[in-house]
Image: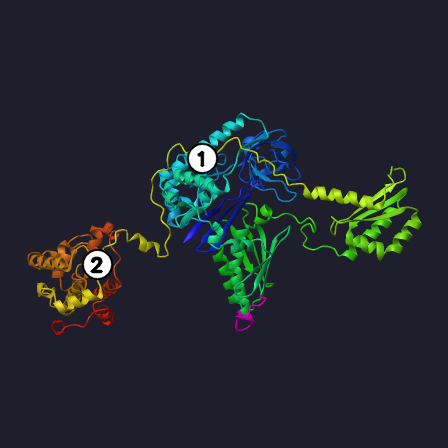
Amino acid sequence: MKRMLINATQPEELRVALVDGQRLYDLDIENRSHEQKKANIYKGKIARVEPSLEAAFVDYGAERHGFLPLKEISREYFTKSSGDQGRVRIQDVLKEGTEVIVQVDKEERGNKGAALTTFVSMAGRYLVLMPNNPRAGGISRRIEGDERNELREALRELDIPNGMGAIVRTAGIGRTTEELQWDLDYLLQLWTTIKTEADNSSAPHFLFQESNVIIRAIRDYLRPDIGEVIIDSREAYNLASAFVQQVMPSFHSKVKFYQDSIPLFNRYQIENQIETAFMREVKLPSGGSIVIDVTEALVSIDINSSRATKGGDIEETATQTNLEAAEEIARQLRLRDMGGLIVIDFIDMSAAKNQRDVENLMRKALEVDRARVQVGRISRFGLLEMSRQRLRPSLEETIFKLCPRCSGQGTIRGTRSLALSILRLVEEEAQKEFSAEIRAITPVEVATFLLNEKREEISDIEKRNKLRVLILPNPNMETPHYEVQRFRQQDEMVSVTSYKLTEEFAAEQTIEAIAPEVIPQAPQPAVQHLHHSSPAPQGRPEVAPEAAPAKAAATSTAVAPAAKQTGLLQKLISWFKGPEPVKVEEAKPETKPAANRNSRDGQRNSNRGRSQSGNNRRSGSSSQRNNRGDRDTSERSERADTSRANVTKGDSNRVDTSRGDSTRPDSNRSESPRDDKRQDQRSGRRRDQNRSPRPAQEQIEDQADTAVTTAPGANSDVEQAAVQADRPPQRTSDKRRE
């Protein structure tokens, strides 16, 4: 069963995990020290217009100005209409100091500021409202087929104000118009409040904040296939319970509070799986591994066979390892929430079929990903290129901290090489004019190397340049860090022994290391989340998707009791009881040209009636059809002369009158079950949805009946299949009648 686990016991970090059984397939971590700004709405001011970039920089209250490209600027902020006179220039339509309502489209990354847009979008439970983008709107790309057509009709009935657009989310599948309108009314109320606050405030101003991770996870991930939502914090439980009760009351029973002494994530054995999201190398079941490296330009993933030896040959081993890696890569991309360009280096495979298998498995594994993913083909170099939408900051950006020693490079310079580099720098500084003293503050191991192995070189520098060189070891400094200071002759220098200078530098480094990290107080938005003005309408219940075909589920809304279905025991009992008292062949002795076929049909109907007693799968039972045949026989003598004149293409009495015309090629079709089926379909097609699925035996018999009635002189193989399939042996009396 799929579950949503929410761990909120620690105030500094909140974790949401989606598990299927005990397998983790999605993870969201919110670090309180890292403020997430995506989807937040601000009122900003144009700080600078840059024509060379066709963009503007907006001051919206952050340390770095936001980047607003021309294509993301709504025309309502243009100073004048550009009309149809060619290309619009940003310096002509936008001026500095203009106040705009912007939304963060992409988070700050590295030295880049946040990407902004004026086309605001607000996500609800079923809809996404775009209040100033009338051209946008429609249905989610993930919705296809008949569901898309139904939602398109429901979308037309919504009362969407002019100048606005709306998109139906995947959660809106199967929702009624009332439910969609209820969600739309809430979003309109929220936008009105934001707009009013923006009109009454000056820029920069924080207007609205996207929901916290608990509300966002429940809103976006809680689906009918999620069996439970388990929360281990009372405060978080109350928040989630109130939200579910208001927005989706049918799911309120799924929200549960966890009170066990064992930690929640340890109970479901996912802590170790979460740790793999922080590792550079992830092991595969076969013994292989994948190595994930994040660079400035892209994410590179390398696949190594390592100890994988399960395959019969090198091609099979490579294919098996690549298939395992494809599934694990799709999972790791979701756990780490990596976005942008991704390049995967698969193990070389010579067979084109194996390459296609790996590509297909990769696409299938990515189908459950909420982000938009574009997957290419494996090139002749064994590389597969793909891109993934960046929904939120990656796990590395949220949790990781840049290594202070290697600056994220992963390697550091050796001691000997670093010492020689410092020595050359000291010599360069000593040769500058008016130099009086050079101080090199280095790690202990570097200072030891310079003072011992390079003592003569340092002494030679002092003699040639007539100055003093000090090598000061700092125990709190690690390679590759160092500092070289140059003092000129006119500078005031205090005569202090070198070991006291070393103590001063060490004390400064200690104070900096002990200083606690100050977590800044997160700013609060002016508009908090509003409560719905009315409770959620009770629409159609959300049903989890089943593995069975949708068509079979749709036709079995009212399933007949299991006791009435035909079984082997009822067949044996009906065989011992003997034939039914009313026989089809006794009611129609006049149809001599079709005697053999009618006798077979009658016997088949009789046997069918015995083997399936009590199962009224059609509009009438076997005896009712026989009585109808008696009435047809009595009426046929009165209407025999006028039957041909009354028979037309749309005449409803065609079945009755055609029995008297023995010269027509279709004369023998009137007694077939197919005509009864046509009449049943014309009279009551709606009852098909309330009828239980027919057993396989009946389907075989219907196919056999159709084949016989359509081709009177056809081969008897189909008849034998219908008669002999899952039927007890015929009695002697039955064989005589045949």
Between disc 1 and disc 2, the foreground one is: 2
Instruction: Find residue 453 and report its horizontal and vertical position in percent.
Output: 84, 58
The quarter of the image holding the N terminus is bottom left
Mark 2 lies on residue:
563
Instruction: Find residue 572 and report its horizontal and vertical position in percent.
Output: 18, 68
Query: Which label belongs to residue 187?
Result: 1
Does the image show residue 593?
A: no
- Chain part drawn in magenta: 305-316
Q: Nearer the viewer, residue 601 or 727?
A: 727
Q: Is residue 308 magenta?
A: yes
Question: Alpha carbon of mark 1 to alpha carbon of mark 2: how far?
Answer: 51 Å
User: Hey, which residue is sitting farthest top in the picture?
Assistant: 200
**Earlier sequence position, callout 1 versus callout 2:** 1
Magenta segment, prevailing SS (helix, strand or loop): loop
Q: Residue placed at 51% from the left, 50% from the top?
A: 27
Would residue 646 appear left or right of 504 to someone viewing this image?
Answer: left
Q: Which quadrant would residue 167 be assigned to in this image?
A: top left
Q: Which quadrant would residue 604 be assigned to in this image?
A: bottom left
Give SS at disc 1.
Answer: helix
Residue type at mark 2: give it: Ala
Q: Residue placed at 70% from the left, 51% from the top?
A: 406
- Circle 1: is it few (<14), some (14-19), or many (20+) Cα within 10 Å? many
